[in-house]
Amino acid sequence: MHIVIDPQDPSPKFRQLMTQIQRQIVAGTLKPGQKLTSVRKLAAELNINPMTISRCYQNMEELGWLERKRGVGMLVARDGLNARMEDRFGFIEPSLKNLIVDAREVGYSKSEVMALVMQYWEDE
């Protein structure tokens, strides 16, 4: 699990943590049944309050993203992953809508935007 908390990001650390874990789950980087880093260890790595991580894990458990296994810790949930995979468009939809609005406002054509997207896709 690779998490980076951006101090310049105005969103709360809790939200950054949750979003990054969700993205790793839908991308398949974190697999169903995989154990997450312990609260204490992740707090030390990120230099943030353990309660922030604990609250994130608990919230994600309530939402069905994670499951707690006694004596093991927090795991990526095995059940319901297919439904969450269908929600992956939600991670990029706001940015995509903003791109389209901005491109139209400055006069880009659909084909020009597609060419730019392809160029940046290949560069990454």
Image (spheres, helix red, strand yellow):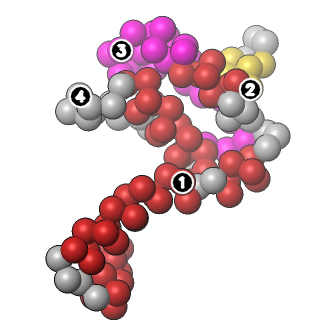
SS under mark 3: loop
Q: Label 4 vs label 2: CA separation?
A: 29 Å
Q: Is residue 77 magenta?
A: no
Identify the magenta region.
30-55
Q: Label 4 vs label 3: CA separation?
A: 11 Å
Residue visible at 69% across and 48% down in the picture: 84
- Decide which of tag 2 and tag 1 comes sooner along the chain: 2
Q: On the image, numbered disc 2 is attached to which residue?
A: 67
- Closer to us: mark 3 or mark 1? 1
The x, y position of residue 32, in whole percent, is 73, 41
Could you say which quadrant of the image residue 44 lies in? top left
- Closer to us: mark 2 or mark 1? 1
Q: On the image, numbered disc 4 is attached to which residue?
A: 7
- Mark 1 closeness class: few <14, some 14–19, many ≥20 residues within 10 Å: few
- Decide which of tag 4 and tag 2 comes sooner along the chain: 4
Could you say which quadrant of the image residue 96 lies in? bottom left
SS under mark 4: loop
**Is 25 on the left-hand or right-hand side of 2?**
right
- Looking at the picture, which amino acid does disc 1 mark? Gly
Pointer 3 with pointer 1, Cβ within 8 A: no
Q: Is residue 44 magenta?
A: yes
- Decide which of tag 4 and tag 3 comes sooner along the chain: 4
Q: Label 3 vs label 1: CA separation?
A: 27 Å
- Closer to us: mark 4 or mark 1? 1
- Decide which of tag 3 and tag 2 comes sooner along the chain: 3
Residue visible at 33% across and 91% down in the picture: 111
Residue visible at 33% across and 62% down in the picture: 98
Q: From this view, report whether residue 120 is shown above or below residue 18.
A: below
Q: Label 3 vs label 2: CA separation?
A: 22 Å
